[in-house]
Amino acid sequence: MGVGEVLTSAALAAALTVDCFAAGVGLGAQRIRVPALSAAAAAGMGAVWMAAGSWIGRSAGRLFPARAAGLGAALLLFVMGGFKCFEGTIKLVLRRHGQRGRLGFSAFGLRFLLEVYLDPQRADANRSKTLSGAEAAGLGLVLSADNLTAGISAGMEGIPLPGLLLLVTVMGAVFLFLGCAAAQRISAGRERDLSLVGGAVLILLGLLRL
């Protein structure tokens, strides 16, 4: 990997995993411990999503000329960045609807996953104040679902996968730990939504690919 690819991969990984910090803050504020293996399980789900997306992207990229594949990769980053910029508003609307009883579905555990998406501390399903490996995997499944789209973009662009997977896993675990550690220093009641930061970085990366 060249310097440019390393910087691009690092920026992409940071944009995708910054939500782990906010999730860590939410868990830490509720005094929920995240053991090292659980943090690795949560971050590992991001790598799984990324690997799956990259395989799809590489397969799709072979069907188009290089220029078209590059434009497709940039478009995906724009769309994903735009979504993350408004993710805080989307969550707010979903929470309000949930409080009014309008989110009543529960098929295949989707209700639980939606609850974790809106409030990461719900991942502690048994209320043990310690996030187990299985609970952390569920949290990672929700937090990193957008890695699938990012992986498709990276695959179409031809970004080397091993380094990107390593960065996503390490950054995800580190941000989760830092968020838990920082919870005591962050004012109670002030929710930290970092989706806008990640969205801005993704849009910038999309612009750089044009």
Image (cartoon, rainbow, N blue to C red):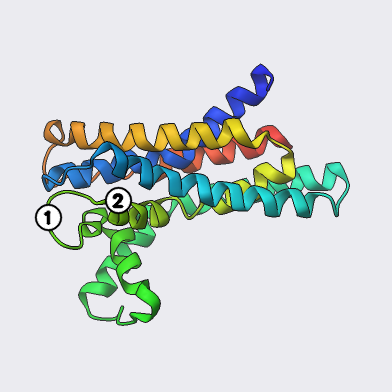
Give me the C-alpha separation between circle 1 and circle 2: 13 Å
**Residue pointed to by mark 2:** 133
Please report the residue visible at 31 percent of the width from the left and 78 percent of the height from the top. Answer: 103
The foreground one among 75 and 66 is 66
Q: Residue furthest right?
A: 65
> Which amino acid type is shown beneath numbered disc 2?
Gly
Residue 31's quadrant in the figure?
Answer: top left
**CA neighbours of label 1 inside 10 A, class few (<14), some (14 to 19), many (20+):** few
Image side of residue 56 versus residue 179, left or right: right
85, above or below 109, in the image: above
Location of the C terminus by quadrant is: top right
Where is residue 44 shown, x and y percent of the image?
A: 44, 44
**Residue pointed to by mark 1:** 128
Where is residue 69 shown, x and y percent of the image?
A: 79, 47
Among numbered discs 1 and 2, the one appearing first in the sequence: 1
The foreground one among 66 and 162 is 162
Circle 1 — which element? loop
